[in-house]
Amino acid sequence: MFEKLERQEQRLAEIDALLADPALASDVARLQQLARERSALEGPLALFRRYRKVEADIASAEALLQAERDDPDLAGLAREELERLRLDWERLTRELQRALLPQDPNDRKDVIVEVRAGTGGEEAALFAAELFRMYARYAERLGWQTEVLTTSESERGGFKEIIFEVRGQGAFSRLKFESGVHRVQRVPLTEAQGRIHTSTATVAVLPEAAEVDVQISPNDLRIDIYHSGGAGGQNVNKVATAVRITHLPTGLVVACQDERSQLKNKQKAMAVLRARLYDMKAREQEQQQAQSRRAQVGTAERSEKVRTYNFPQDRLTDHRIGLTLHNLPAILNGELDPLLDALAASAQAEQLATAAS
C-alpha cells in the first residue's frame, strides 16, 4: 500500500511540473486529462500525509511515555494521547485502504439518464414520470443541473420514455447504481376496483461522453430531419425541426424533437448518441456483448427487478443489498442519500473483500 502511495506522490510531482509548462496551454485535452488525474491523486495523498503525521506522533508519545514512566501524571497523559492516536491510526488505515481501491474513471462525469415505461401500460408510464421527478428533485437538492433531452409522453401525462442529462460533481458516482428495472406495487389511478397492480420502469444511467472520449465520423451518420409530432404550436407544424440520427456501424438510432430549433435537437441527439457509444465501448472492454445495454435495463420483466416501491406498505426494497426503507413520499421527493450511500458502501465492501482475497 505504501509503495503505491509513494509512487503516487512522485506522479503528483510530475503532473505539477507538466502543468507548469506554458507549452501545455495549447493542448486543452491533455491539460484537462492531467487536471483530472491530479484531482484524483490529491485525496489519497492528503490521507497519506495525515497517516504519516499520526505515525510520527505515536512514536513521540511512546518515547514520552518511556521517558516519564516514573511520573504517574505525565505517564497517564501520554497513555491517553497514545490511545487517541492509535484510534486515529486505525481509522486512517481503513480510509487509505478504501481510497486506494480502483476508481471508476467515469465517477466524476455528468450523466445521461434514460427512463422508460416497462410492463404495466399507462401505469408504467406514470411511474416512469415519478422516477424522473425523483431524480430531478435529488439533483436540485445537490445543486446539480437537469436538462430534458427527449420525451415521449403517454395519454395521461406519464412518459413512455424520457431521456435527460444531469450535470454536477460526481453525478455518475451517485447515480450509477440506479440502472435496472424498478418495480412499483400500488392501486393505480386507472383501477376502478381498488386492486393492487404491479408495473415496471427501466432506468439506464450512462456517463456523458465528450468528443475526445468517442470519435464519431460524419460518414458514419445518417441524419434525417422531419416534422415534430404532438404539441408545439404553429412552429412545429410549419418547420421541420425534429432530428433522427442513425449510427450506421452499430445501428443505434437517436431521435430528438422537443426543441423548436433543429440545431438544438441535433446537439441533444448527438450527446445521447455519444453516451450510448461510450457505454458500448466500456462494455466491450469488460468483455461483454457490444449490444448489451440490456444488461442495464433487461427486458423490463418483473423478475429482473433491482428495486420495489410498495405503496400499500410504504416500503422501498433494494433487492441487490437487501435494504428496506420506509417513507416513500420523501424518497420520491428526492431524499435518496440513505439509499445511494448504502449501495455505494456495499460496492466498496465487495471491492475490499475482493482485494483481500
Image (cartoon, grey):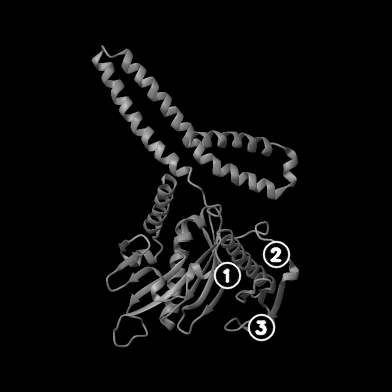
Which residue shows up at 29% across the image and 25% down it? 80
Residue 199: image quadrant is bottom left
**Residue pointed to by mark 2:** 216
Q: Secondary structure at mark 3?
A: loop
Residue 305: image quadrant is bottom left
* Amino acid on which disc 1 is placed: Gln
Residue 181 rendering spot, x and y as whole percentages: 43, 70
Q: Secondary structure at mark 2?
A: loop
Which callout, 1 or 3, points to the residue nearer the camera? 1
Mark sitting earlier along the chain (1/3) = 3
Rate crowding at label 3 as few (under 14), some (14 to 19) or many (20 or more) other CA atoms within 10 Å. some
Residue 338 rendering spot, x and y as whole percentages: 36, 56
Q: How many marks?
A: 3
Please, is residue 233 above or below residue 136 in the view? below
Q: Nearer the viewer, residue 255 or 280?
A: 280
Rate crowding at label 2 as few (under 14), some (14 to 19) or many (20 or more) other CA atoms within 10 Å. some
Which residue shows up at 71% across the image and 75% down it? 222
Q: Which mark is residue 291?
A: 1
**Residue pointed to by mark 3:** 227
Q: Nearer the viewer, residue 135 or 72?
A: 72
Q: Nearer the viewer, residue 190 or 302?
A: 302
